Image (spheres, grey):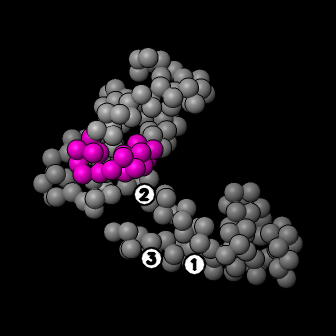
Amino acid sequence: MNDKKILALFKNGQEEKAFLKLYALYPRIEKLILSKGGTKNDAQDVFQESLIILHRNLEKSNFKLTSSFYTYLYSVSRFVWKDIQKGYSKQELMDFSKEETEMFQDVLEERKFKLAEKAFSELGNRCRQLLQLFYLKDWSFKVIAEHMQFKSEKIAKNQKYKCLKKVKSIYETLITNHS
């Protein structure tokens, strides 16, 4: 199946079929990771990560696939593997093309997203609940205070501030430990 057909599957909401087609590219990505000193498990992880980055980019309205899916996944997989191996030389960074720089930024963005998810998961249940009610459900502090049995809106607002401060602290610790 060619790239245009796979792209059409994504656009028509048939993501599962599209991903099944993309899995045909896995052996080539595995060969890349094995040639760089990785294991088969590493190759699977890298490929999954690359598919996640591809999927997130396809959801962006301004994203255009300017190469084949294979070339895109190969490049992203290379960046993901290199990121796992802890970095690039300054010369390698300077030699990136504009397209490669954008792919590298996508890899870094995905890593930050995963660390943010991990930081959120390490919060206590009450903090997680409060932040979800405020940010995901868009509840007012008055409704949150009633639901979570705070004495006032002000207390709910202060708790939200403390929870945000805590999650930012956890996130910063994770960033420092993964650098």
Mark 2 belongs to which amino acid?
Arg
Residue 39 belongs to magenta span? yes
Mark 3 sits on what residue?
Answer: 173
* Within-10-Å neighbours for mark 2: few <14, some 14–19, many 20+: some
- Disc 3 to disc 2: CB gap under 8 Å: no
Q: Which mark is residue 166?
A: 1
* Within-10-Å neighbours for mark 3: few <14, some 14–19, many 20+: few
Mark 1 belongs to which amino acid?
Lys
Compared with residue 79, is residue 120 higher up or lower down, i.e. above or below? below
Look at the numbered disc 2 and give the secondary structure of its residue: helix
Residue at 57% x, 78% y is 166
Query: Residue 139 location in percent, x, y?
Result: 77, 61
Q: Earlier in the sequence, mark 2 or mark 1?
A: 2
- Disc 2 to disc 1: CB gap under 8 Å: no
Compared with residue 129, is residue 57 higher up or lower down, i.e. above or below? above
Residue at 67% x, 75% y is 124
Q: Find the distance from the CA under tag 3 to the CA under tag 2.
A: 14 Å
The segment highlighted magenta reads 32-50
Pair 2/1: label in front = 2
Query: Residue 18 location in percent, x, y?
Result: 52, 27
Q: Main secondary structure of the magenta part?
A: helix
Look at the numbered disc 3 and give the secondary structure of its residue: helix
Mark 2 sits on what residue?
Answer: 111
